[in-house]
Amino acid sequence: MRLVLFLLRSFFFVLYHQFAWTYDLVAATVSLGRWKDWVRSALPYLSGRVLEIGFGPGYLQLSLFELGIPAFGLDESRQMARQASRRLHKSGFLPNLLRGFAQSLPFPKNSFDIVVATFPSEYIFDPHTLTEIRRVLTQGGKLVVMPTAWITGKRLHERLAAWLSRVTGQSPAIDTSLSGTEALFARNGFEFRHEIVELSGSRVLVIIATK
């Protein structure tokens, strides 16, 4: 299993960097076309001044701009930053995108009402990341994390996709997803709750952590 996890991490790193141009295709394939809907299901939780960490190809950034929500984005991938910037420019928006790491956010304290991360890797649960997020949030501000989603449809290809996600650890059982997470957030100064968003043929886990 450790070998599988290592190979998966290596695959996702390359996918997010050197092969970022294939990211949309891969994400759409493994999610059976639901990936963009999963990402956009974060929108009801977002308001005020928003920072998105790990903006990837920029679909949530675009949705936020279209709704008139002031948004900034941070991502360490040069390739993803280029994709997202092109997408926003093409739609007539001026991007507020920076390259950097979540463990050292280049913003002053109390800068944002919401910090959001959709399907991030393990960095989002790094105590250094949580400390930095808490620093840049206003009092009462929220960190919204969508760590995983489950395909729940009953057709053969949906059951196969759900099984593959389970065995690779991409869609663990909810008790596994939240094991130790609430205590981690509490240690870093957050009040923790979670919700399940039900979509057609799938569901998404949403963590809401309040400063």
Image (cartoon, rainbow, N blue to C red):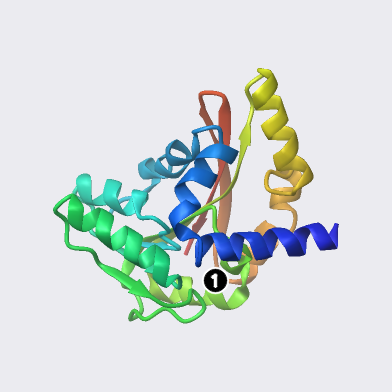
* Residue nearer the viewer, 52 or 181: 52
> Which three-letter amino acid code belongs to the residue tagged 1?
Leu
Report the label total: 1
Q: Which residue is mark 1?
A: 130
Task: Pick the residue in front: 82 or 55.
Answer: 82
Image coords of residue 4 (percent x, y): 79, 57
x, y percent for residue 46 = 35, 49
Location of the N terminus by quadrant is bottom right
Is residue 73 shown to the viewer in this render?
A: no
Task: Judge left or right: residue 132 versus residue 113.
Answer: right
User: Residue 201 at x, y = what percent?
Assistant: 56, 24
**Residue placed at 40% from the left, 42% from the top?**
40
Q: Which residue does the image show at 23% across and 63% down from the upper left?
A: 95
Q: Nearer the viewer, residue 150 or 25?
A: 25
**Residue 101 in sight from this viewpoint:** yes
Asked which quadrant contains residue 157, the reply is top right
Residue 114 vertical position relative to residue 109 in the rendered view, above or below? above
Front-most of residues 57 and 62? 57
